[in-house]
Amino acid sequence: MARARRHWLLKTEPSTYAFDDLWRAPRRTTGWDGVRNHQAKLFLRDGMAVGDLALVYHSSTEAPGVVGVARVVGPARPDPTQFDPQDPHHEPWATPEAPVWWLVDVQAVVRLARVVTLAELRAEPALAGMALLQKGQRLSVQPVEPAHFARVLALAGLRPADVER
DNA sequence: GCCAACGTTGGC
DNA sequence: GCCAACGTTGGC
């Protein structure tokens, strides 16, 4: 039997890569590259599987918050930007035989009609345990409990079936 | 292994 | 821009 679907949160700075960039990408799909934290890497490489769902979160912007939902559509693979000397995410010690950084391919599923802001999330008692809301946390890839995921969808006015397409 | 210095994240 | 919190680096 297949493993249960897991849920995640992916942070991005919209000035660098916004959810709308993903929404407009070919097949609404991109490699989620540039993650340079080892704990986040482990979630990408070892935690995620095709079919998992992720909240996409905008940070470092006027109204930080959840802006969309994406699905993992490809298994973990080495992040190609680590091999590119011209790329800001270049990793001098990485080789194709021994990659350091990993990514998964994600596809936009739903673009929220409005931002579910960080302030709203904080105001929701049912979400008090979310990793995102813990003091000092700054991981850009985080696991999300299914109940929390469902609650955020509800705040966005979505029903569970809305993310199954 | 300890820890100070420095860099980064990210809300405000 | 400020600053808290965390991660990384490097001397010892």
Image (spheres, coloured by chain):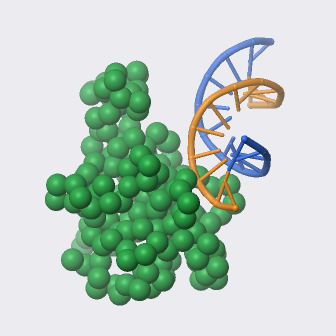
Chain colours: A green, B orange, C blue
User: Which residue does the image show at 47% across and 59% down from the upper left?
Assistant: A58
| Horizontal arrangement in the rendering, residue A25 relative to residue A8 (left or right) | left
| Above or below: residue A68 compared with residue A14 | below
| Horizontal arrangement in the rendering, residue A165 relative to residue B10 (left or right) | left
- Residue A129 in view here: no
| Above or below: residue A87 compared with residue C1 | above
Q: Nearer the viewer, residue A137 or A145?
A: A137
Residue A72 rendering spot, x and y as whole percentages? 28, 61
Residue A70 rendering spot, x and y as whole percentages? 32, 65
User: Which residue does the image show at 43% across and 58% down from the upper left?
Assistant: A10
Residue most toward the left?
A27
User: Which residue does the image show at 38% across and 50% down from the upper left?
Assistant: A17
Q: Nearer the viewer, residue A86 or C5?
A: A86
Q: Nearer the viewer, residue B12 or A92?
A: B12
Q: Quadrant of the N terminus of chain A?
A: bottom left
User: Which residue does the image show at 35% across and 87% down from the upper left?
Assistant: A159
Residue A137 rendering spot, x and y as whole percentages? 62, 55
Residue A5 rendering spot, x and y as whole percentages? 33, 71
| Above or below: residue A81 compared with residue A86 | below
| Horizontal arrangement in the rendering, residue A45 relative to residue A62 (left or right) | left
Q: Quadrant of residue A73?
A: bottom left
Q: Quadrant of the C terminus of chain A?
A: bottom left
Q: Quadrant of residue A34?
A: top left
- Residue A128 in view here: yes
User: How many numbered tags mark residues here?
Assistant: 0
